[in-house]
Amino acid sequence: MRDFQTSGGLLRALHPATLTRWLVSGPPTAFMLLFFLAPSLIMVLASFRFPGAFGGLAPLIGAGRAGEDTGLTLENYQFFFSDWLYAEIFVKSLVVALVSTLTCLVMAYPLALLIARSPKRHRDLMVLLVILPFASNFLIRVYALMILLGPQQALASAVNGLLALFGVAPVNLLFSTFAVIVGMVYVHLPFMVLPLYTNLEKHDPSLLDAAQDLGANGWQRFWRVTFPLSLPGIFSGSALVFIPVLGMFAIPDLLGGTRDILIGNLIKDQFLGTRDWPFGSMLSIMLTLVVLGLAGFAARLGRRDRNEET
Amino acid sequence: MALLEIRNVVRRFADFTAVDGVSLQVEAGEFFTLLGPSGCGKTTLLRMIAGFDAPDEGELLLDGQSLRGIPPEHRPIHTVFQSYALFPHLTVAENVAFPLRMAKVAPDDIRRRVQDALEAVHLSEKQRHLPHELSGGQKQRVALARGLVNRPRLLLLDEPLGALDAKLREEMQMELINLQKNVGITFVFVTHSQAEALALSHRIAVMNRGHVEQLDEPSRLYSFPRNRFVADFIGKINMLEAAVLRSTAEALVLDVAGVGEVWAPALPAVAAGQRGMFAVRPEQVRIQSGEVAPAGVGHNQVHGRVLDFLYIGDVTTYLVELANGTRLEALLPNTAPGRAKFFEADDPVTLTWSSQVGVFLDA
Ligand SMILES: Nc1ncnc2c1ncn2[C@@H]1O[C@H](COP(=O)(O)OP(=O)(O)OP(=O)(O)O)[C@@H](O)[C@H]1O
Ligand SMILES: [Mg+2]
């Protein structure tokens, strides 16, 4: 036994515990490498190439078809920075994502708190109700929203009737930024509720007793105990909403107006519409960089908070 | 006027009465202990004092003012919870500052008072640590500092030493006594450990099944338990069936099964003919080798044989069987080094005890 263990890496790798670890974590790691890392690298490379004449990519080496440039280029990136239009769409998308995330947070927090403070036997049912919408198709639910927000419907009539009282011209609820945000919030709300609930449910109730005992009223108990302890849940919920909203194209397509083009639509168009893959790749890499930048910023913010506290 | 008065408090849960007519008074500056077995209602009573629960009947008064309807955050009463309940996201200093912040004390004052409180519990150098970086004893100290820093009228402590190991517990007992003496704040302490209660308290209320069995100073509680429950619960005690022969102002004369005539301290309320138990502590019973002749009236004495013994280190307990099969325990300190026992099993011995010790229990 001793000989085996001292005789180098290969035998150590065959040690039962090590072997089990590799067998268990191997397949998912391989899956991630193949279907996440590899496509990402392909995208990075594609963003430096020329589009093919009929979509796809022009060859990297050798001659292309007539009118095709071949090889590597920075043109895609140069084009992005040469027109304010793209920056504008990025900013608008970030604003929509931010507003959707904050709306989700404000709506999800009381709901998660309510579930977490309910008797244990009711909690599972309530969580089930929160994720129940996932049981039906995403597109169908968005179409249902279209009907609900439609011009001849009760909701629009009520809103416009109210506006008329103040002498304001009628508005369209559907095909607006408002409808886009409603759709985003509706679809992503469970992604905010679940991490918040998971966090809040773990809080030790004796902490609230202690806070009350030491003189904290309900408001102070929330802001000084519950809220700071729920920050990890807020961060993960916000990430789970913010990032998908940023890349979402179906909702702006269906619920937004012509001016509600977001990054997601822009990228989708490059691949399915104008068929300019390199430009689309460049856009999604810019998007990834923006998200990573924001995540890094948030992490630093969180750390600074910690340091100031201590 | 007593600082805290509990008047006939009853608390029922569904069909179970957790606190069943408790009345007692806690004086200002006192170290008062609620002692009783698990489930006797100590925590329930404490939660009513803190304001987390309300009595179904009866009244709680602080400084003569009823506490009815006053929520916990407005009572000048703080609690040290058994689980400590330190805020995990706040440092030691911030935890201790919490009650001062809630009371809107000026920031400069807060800093100074937090320092003082941490010094009092010897934790100044840990003030920037988070609770999870502390040992059990240190967490305990933070909880104490946090409970005391805003000088409540009353500090409630619910088995605060329960989670500590024996050695640390003894250390903390000493610190608690000193702390309470120094700050002069009234403590209401809950425990189910009789040793802890005896060591710490000015007065102890022994609770059983939701009511107070006896309320007394530790030494009186130990020497003169009022009934079988208290006698049994506090320390070790020999209990022998007995009948009262004579009851005078000077002494009580009993007929104890297997012993014969026994003289005990007078109990005015007891009358001749009453039946009950004679109880005497093992350390009050002297054990001597051989069969010693009776020394005369008023000297309690009985012969027996050593059945077994238990060496504990500082003392050895001898189990002695009397002629009629009754068993008595006697305790002997091990003063001779390296010697675990003075008697062997089956040795004939004589047990004696003074007429000034022992107590007759009629219930
Ligand atoms: N909220 C409640 N609902 C129902 N029964 C309760 C409730 N709180 C306490 N009890 C019951 O009241 C009795 C007394 O409980 P309490 O917690 O006061 O005991 P305790 O003396 O503190 O015991 P321990 O030493 O184990 O902490 C127990 O039998 C308990 O089951
Ligand atoms: Mg208890």
Image (tube, helix red, strand yellow):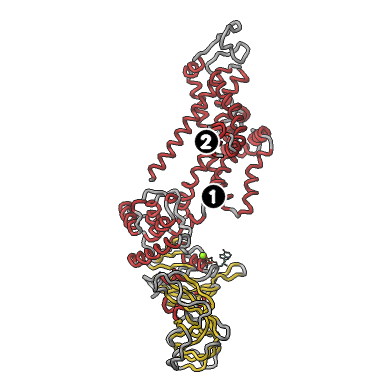
Which quarter shows the C terminus of chain A? top left
Q: Position of residue B65 (x, y in %)?
A: 42, 71
- The quarter of the image holding the N terminus of chain A is top right
Label 1 marks a residue whose chain is: A
Image: A300 above or below A198:
above
Q: Position of residue A143 (x, y in %)?
A: 67, 33
Front residue (pair B81, A196): B81
The residue sitting at 56% across, 36% down in the picture is A4
Q: Mark 2 — residue?
A: A6
- Distance CA(mark 2)–CA(mark 1): 45 Å
Q: Which residue sits at x=55%, y=87%?
A: B258
Front position in the image: B38 or A119: B38
- Residue A26 is labelled as none
Q: In the image, is the residue at mark 2 within 8 Å of ligand 1 by its beta carbon?
A: no
* Mark 1 crowdedness (10 Å alpha carbons): few <14, some 14-19, many ≥20: few
Question: Picture quarter containing residue A129?
Answer: top right
Q: Is any part of residue A119 visible from this angle?
A: yes
Closer-to-camera residue (B22/B281): B281
Instruction: Point out the tag, 2 or 1, that comes first from the N-terminus.
Output: 2
